[in-house]
Image (cartoon, rainbow, N blue to C red):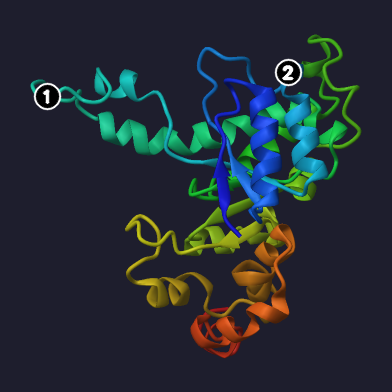
Amino acid sequence: AGVAIVPATWDVDEAVREVRWAREQGLRGIMIPVVCGDHEPYHHPRYNALWAACQDLDMVVHFHSGPADTELYFGSWPPDPGKPALRGAMGIYVSEVAWFVARPLTFLIWGGIFEDHPRLRVAITEGTAIWVPSYLELLDQRYSSHAGNAKLGDYKSHLSMKPSEYFARNVRIGASVSRREAELRHEIGVRCLMWGSDFPHPEGSWPHTAERLDASFRGLPEDELVRMLGDNAADFYGFDSEKLAPLVARIGPKKRDLAAGAGSRA
């Protein structure tokens, strides 16, 4: 499979050419910047050709965690080795980085990008999933006919669905999935979670993947395990599950070890 890194904010026409080239090489998606910087944000019409190309070519658009307001946190970026970092800088970074990787979704949902491109697929990767339920609740509340929203004028008539419905249809979350996130799977969407080890980064499950899988997933229904641990990704990226079956049998987690009835957790 594979993903092409495309700096789409700089030159959209060139980005579209890169998308086409990547598809011709057999890649299944692109990764574009989380932060737009001085460039137009993702609900700007200049990106319409990019969304259309990704939809038409079945290329998943990825946003990967990492970028954030690091200069604000640390005082300079990269950090100046001759100066001590501001106290709490790393704590602020690790607390806010998931917000930054989720932020493009807000632009895509409210900007009507998923409305105009219903088959566009977006994956948020390595940004945890713990934030999803409260995020969707907030967006749906803002979409509702609550009296407090009426004074703001019409900002949603171009949308035919609630934000959470666009999320369920168009978005998937790639994460190593903590036990708490697994418990929230129905609020997040069982079909929206794609487990990954994040190898070789230690902030994922590696190098203790077997133990982490057990801690996060033991005792869950088998059909949900199959979805989150494999089928969701296979469906989203169009993988050939039959061809992958021998590899899964050799290195994949065993359903019998994790599914309900295999242990004490319910």
Left/right placement of residue 137 relative to residue 131 reads: right
Note whether 176 is above or below 112 in the view shown.
Answer: below
Helix, strand, or loop for circle 1? loop
What number is the disc on residue 122? none
User: Percent x, y for residue 94?
Assistant: 36, 38
Q: CA distance from mark 2 to mark 1?
A: 41 Å
Image-quadrant location for residue 211: bottom left
User: Percent x, y for residue 38?
Assistant: 52, 12
Task: Identify residue type, mark 2.
Answer: Arg
Left/right placement of residue 173 relative to residue 47 reads: left
Q: Which residue is mark 1?
A: 84
Q: Residues within 10 Å of mark 2 (few under 14, many from 20)?
A: some
Callouts 2 and 1 close, C-beta under 8 Å: no
Q: Quadrant of the N terminus?
A: bottom right
Image-quadrant location for residue 54: top right
Note whether 77 is above or below 2 in the view shown.
Answer: above
Q: Residues within 10 Å of mark 1 (few under 14, many from 20)?
A: few
Q: Residue at x 67, y 29 (%)?
A: 106
Evaluate whether residue 163 shows in this view.
no
Foreground residue among 57 and 172: 57
Mark nearer the viewer, 2 or 1: 2
Helix, strand, or loop for circle 2? helix
User: Percent x, y for residue 252?
Assistant: 53, 80
User: Percent x, y for residue 53?
Assistant: 77, 37
Q: Residue at x 39, y 37 (%)?
A: 95
Q: Which residue is mark 2?
A: 46
Task: Identify residue type, mark 1.
Answer: Pro
Note whether 241 is above or below 44 in the view shown.
Answer: below
Q: Residue at x 57, y 35 (%)?
A: 6
Left/right placement of residue 20 relative to residue 134 reads: right
Evaluate whether residue 120 shows in this view.
yes
